[in-house]
């Protein structure tokens, strides 16, 4: 038994769940591992294994989880925590919004309305002290794509993204969970209000321009979001936050473009690190990126992207 296995055994024993059945859960892009622990009586908890030796740190996850639950959102409750990087969390459910939305198109309005309503509520929540994605930082974040993916000088792309953000999304003053998309949202149909949407994967939360998480939801590179849903949720969020739909659509376009420009570089790094499954997603990232860059106000950024960043080749 390795030292970490022994530490995990002690953690589970101390928490009184050493005899529960563990079923691995698909991991995300990080080094964290997850399992669902099920008791003989049927109760379940989620185990997170975030080994500090791999650079993981549960501190921010715990901090944001408690912030969200304190403000009335449905995030996992921290049942037990260990400095070695083990967490026991409440189990929010097994059905993601992505799984539910793939069943019938009729469900999508209900699902995306509920997710957007969570973001409207989050928009009005008191912000934490967090890193900011302001125009300067937002531009710097896409340098990885020029350097690793395109093998080009990052300066023109960074400057173009900074300029677009300065014009259309200059204020980084709203809390954003950063990975707010349908696969990271748990659908809880028997709950009500914001409790219907369980929140996961928020340890990288930041302060960002209003609408950042909505851009993550609607410019999703994991599944196609219908155009009518994009228009509906853009208008819904705009109404809920006191803005016009046209202004919000432009902001979502520039935020979606910034996010997916960075994702091209991040996926390139993951592929180089042996996570080849991300190669199949690259063409979709490119497609969604070009959709957002199709907004007339982003013509200059689009020109630079098409000049300096090659389209990915399907594996």
Image (tube, helix red, strand yellow):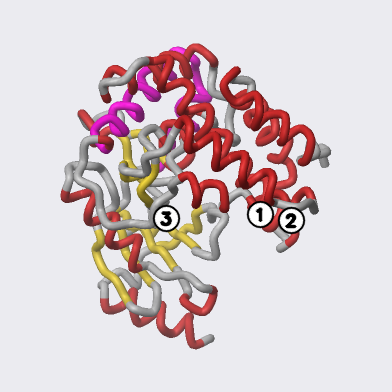
Task: Check the image and report above or below for 64 versus 241.
Answer: below
Please report whichever mark, 2 or 3, sits nearer to the chain's N-terminal start: 2
User: Which residue is pictured at 32% across the width and 51% down the height?
Assistant: 91
**Sequence-first disc among 3 and 1:** 1
Residue 95 is inside the magenta segment = yes
Q: Which residue is mark 3?
A: 204
Q: Nearer the viewer, mark 3 or mark 1?
A: 1
Q: Pointers 2 and 1 in contact (CB under 8 A)?
A: yes
* Residue with the mark numbered 2: 148
Image quadrant for the C terminus?
A: top right
Q: Residues within 10 Å of mark 1 (few under 14, many from 20)?
A: many
Q: Are marks 2 and 3 in contact (CB under 8 Å)?
A: no
On residue 79, the disc is: none
SS type, badge 1: helix
Q: Is residue 7 above or below residue 301?
A: below
Write down the residue under mark 1: 144
Locate residue 220, reporting x and y percent.
54, 33
């Amino acid at each position: 038994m390795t030292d970490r296995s022994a530490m995990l055994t002690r953690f589970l024993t101390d928490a009184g769940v050493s005899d529960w059945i563990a079923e691995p859960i698909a991991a995300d892009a990080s080094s964290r591992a997850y399992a669902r622990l099920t008791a003989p009586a049927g109760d379940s908890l989620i185990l997170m294994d975030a080994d500090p030796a791999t650079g993981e740190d549960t501190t921010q996850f715990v901090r944001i989880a408690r912030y969200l639950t304190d403000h009335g959102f449905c995030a996992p409750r921290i049942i037990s925590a260990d400095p070695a990087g083990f967490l026991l969390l409440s189990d929010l459910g097994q059905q993601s919004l992505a799984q539910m939305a793939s069943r019938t198109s009729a469900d999508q309005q209900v699902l995306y309305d509920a997710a957007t309503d969570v973001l409207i509520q989050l928009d009005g929540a008191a912000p934490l002290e967090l890193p900011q994605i302001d125009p300067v930082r937002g531009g710097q974040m896409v340098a990885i794509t020029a350097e690793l993916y395109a093998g080009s000088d990052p300066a023109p792309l960074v400057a173009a993204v900074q300029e677009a953000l300065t014009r259309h999304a200059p204020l980084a003053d709203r809390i954003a969970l950063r990975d707010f998309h349908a696969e990271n949202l748990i659908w809880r149909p028997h709950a009500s209000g914001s409790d219907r949407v369980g929140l996961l994967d928020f340890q990288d939360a930041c302060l960002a321009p209003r609408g950042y998480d909505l851009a993550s939801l609607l410019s999703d590179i994991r599944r196609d979001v219908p155009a009518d849903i994009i228009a509906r949720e853009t208008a819904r969020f705009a109404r809920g936050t006191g803005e016009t739909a046209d202004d919000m659509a432009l902001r979502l376009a520039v935020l979606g473009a910034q996010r997916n420009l960075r994702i091209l570089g991040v996926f390139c790094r993951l592929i180089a690190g042996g996570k080849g499954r991300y190669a199949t997603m690259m063409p979709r990232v490119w497609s969604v990126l070009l959709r957002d860059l199709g907004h007339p106000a982003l013509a200059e950024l689009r020109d630079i992207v098409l000049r300096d960043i090659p389209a990915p080749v399907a594996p």
